[in-house]
Image (cartoon, grey):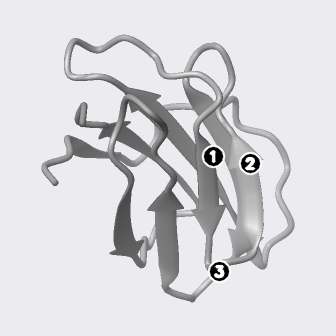
């Protein structure tokens, strides 16, 4: 599965106070044409689950200093995929592109 994977250090969600031991993670899912994908489930480290909004967005607040396993559940139109990340920034965002089945 090919995904578009873009790291943006200081862009994305509004900057708000975060506990010093946490990171703010911003994910945005799109199709190959850049259209946002709504109602796609994202699972972090097999336990934290959220569904993307109408803008294809999802926000997480997670502990610092660990590796994150990110699973994006597919649906009847799009393939699922897994990736692993260990970002170094307090705020970071991912733009992920799902492929059609």
Could you say which disc has been placed on residue 80 in the image? none
- Which tag, 2 or 3, sits closer to the chain's start? 2
Q: Do the residues labelled 2 and 1 touch (CB within 8 Å)?
A: yes
Q: Taking 51 as reference, is 57 above or below it? A: above
Report the mark closest to the observer, 1 or 3.
Answer: 1
- Badge 3 crowding class, 10 Å Cα cut-off, few under 14, some 14 to 19, many 20 or more, is some
Name which residue lies at 26% across and 43% down: 6
For mark 1, what is the residue? Answer: 41
Element on which disc 3 rests: loop
Q: Dividing the image into 4 quarters, which one contains the C terminus?
A: top left
Residue 20: image quadrant is bottom right
Name which residue lies at 52% across and 77% down: 68
Q: Taking 38 as reference, is 92 above or below it? A: below
- Which tag, 1 or 3, sits closer to the chain's start? 1
* Residue 42 in picture, x, y percent from top left: 60, 52
Q: Taking 48 as reference, is 64 above or below it? A: below
Q: How far apart are marks 2 and 3 (CA)?
A: 19 Å
**Which residue extends farthest bottom?**
66
* Residue 88 in picture, x, y percent from top left: 44, 73
Name which residue lies at 29% across and 14% down: 34
Locate residue 92 relative to residue 5 in the image: left or right: right
* Residue 4 in picture, x, y percent from top left: 20, 41
Q: As rendered, which of 33 and 90 lies closer to the eye?
A: 33
Q: As rendered, which of 35 and 91 lies closer to the eye?
A: 35
For mark 2, what is the residue? Answer: 50
- Badge 1 crowding class, 10 Å Cα cut-off, few under 14, some 14 to 19, many 20 or more, is some
């Amino acid at each position: 599965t090919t995904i578009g994977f873009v790291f943006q250090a200081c862009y994305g969600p509004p900057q708000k106070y975060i506990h010093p031991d946490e990171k703010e993670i911003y994910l945005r899912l799109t199709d190959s044409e850049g259209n946002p994908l709504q109602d796609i489930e994202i699972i972090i480290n097999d336990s934290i689950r959220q569904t993307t909004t109408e803008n294809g967005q999802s926000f997480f607040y997670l502990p610092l200093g660990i590796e994150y396993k990110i699973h994006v559940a597919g649906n009847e139109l799009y393939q699922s995929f897994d990736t692993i990340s260990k970002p170094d920034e307090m705020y970071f965002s991912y733009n992920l592109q799902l492929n059609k089945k």
